[in-house]
Amino acid sequence: MNALVHLTVLLNETVAAVLGKPDGVYVDATFGRGGHARHLLAQLGSGARVIGFDKDPQAIASGEALMREDSRFEIIHDSFASLLPALEARGLLGQVDGLLADLGVSSPQIDDAERGFSFMNDGPLDMRMDTTRGLSAAQWLLQVSEAELTDVFKTYGEERHARRIARAVLAEQAVTPITRTKVLADVIAKAHPSWERHKHPATRCFQAIRIAVNRELGDLEDLLAQSLQALSVGGRLAVISFHSLEDRLVKQFIAREAKGDDFPPGLPVTTWQMNPQLKKVGKAIEPSAAEVDANPRARSAHLRVAERLASVQK
């Protein structure tokens, strides 16, 4: 298999989860190479509309190619955190029938050493989803303090030895700026006191830096909050996450919006009066054994689905 080929995770399950009106409006918040969007378009009518978002210039090139093939599709070069302004500009607020997001980094991004996401192959320390804007990981490391780097490793990487590793990274940085993935991976590996079995010691720290550089969790929180205004009544939200930090945000958001407003304990209120905004749809879906065999990177995926409810007028 070509190293830069991307196998779309939970393809059928995700599209089935959001598919509703044949001529409806749908958003693929993480277009990538278009696996979900193409599968969705194949099942929609001639009056449907699918809007894709992505920050990656290579993904945008794929999206522009799909636009030339299918007039029902449009690609937007921006973060999905800009969902509402994009929908408002198109007169589509509250009209989205299905919104899907496949979070994290894609296989083409990981496998391309020049993107700097992986410690497996040496490359420039970049890690930006959008290489046209923002600070690269190397530039970010030049301005971060030990306390900030420790917090990033601890919070986004759930790294137990965060302070020790942060100190070692910045000590190396003070001698020679770290601009290559292999140099950073070697510094982390040398500083790490207890290697996990079957896991490179730099895994958690690389994930943490990537999340910080791309503001991944902040953008996800924005997308989830904006989904309530974007979706039509009965519209579906489907999110695939690959690590516990993302999955926790999605799970808690759905649970909170399915519960509705808070009232003092013991107050006799009906579910309708609590004004829930979402209905949880089933349990989290995981890839089948066959999919994991075909694509080992799918093994940690979790798909959570919710449906937009009508708001109570107050």
Image (cartoon, rainbow, N blue to C red):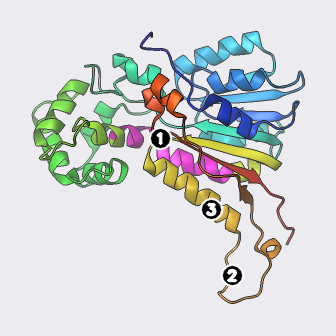
- Return the disc, 2 or 1, that comes first in the chain's sequence: 1
Confirm or deny contact between disc 2 and disc 1 (CB under 8 A). no
Among the 4 quarters of the image, the one containing residue 182: top left
Quarter in which the N terminus is drawn: top left
Q: Nearer the viewer, mark 2 or mark 3?
A: 3
Residue 178 x/y as whole percent? 20, 30
In the rendered structure, the answer to whether residue 116 lies left or right of residue 221 reads left
Crowd rating for badge 2 (residues with CA inside 10 Å; few <14, some 14–19, many 20+): few
Q: Amino acid at mark 1?
A: Phe
Res 28 seen here:
no
- Reply above or below: 224 against 74: below
Q: Residue furthest bottom?
A: 266
Q: Which residue is mark 2?
A: 263
User: Magenta part of the protein: which range?
Assistant: 209-226
Confirm or deny contact between disc 1 and disc 3 (CB under 8 A). no
- Return the disc, 1 or 3, that comes first in the chain's sequence: 1
- Return the disc, 2 or 3, that comes first in the chain's sequence: 3
User: Under tag 2, what secondary structure?
Assistant: loop
Among the 4 quarters of the image, the one containing residue 278: bottom right
Residue 137 x/y as whole percent? 33, 33
Residue 209 - label = none
Crowd rating for badge 3 (residues with CA inside 10 Å; few <14, some 14–19, many 20+): some
Q: Amino acid at mark 2?
A: Phe
Q: Who's the residue at 17% across and 42% down the image?
A: 195
Q: Who's the residue at 80% across and 57% down the image?
A: 309
Q: Amino acid at mark 3?
A: Ala
Q: Which residue is mark 1?
A: 242
User: Under tag 3, what secondary structure?
Assistant: helix
Crowd rating for badge 1 (residues with CA inside 10 Å; few <14, some 14–19, many 20+): some
Whether 235 is among the magenta residues is no
Q: Which residue is mark 3?
A: 255
Residue 51 x/y as whole percent? 73, 29
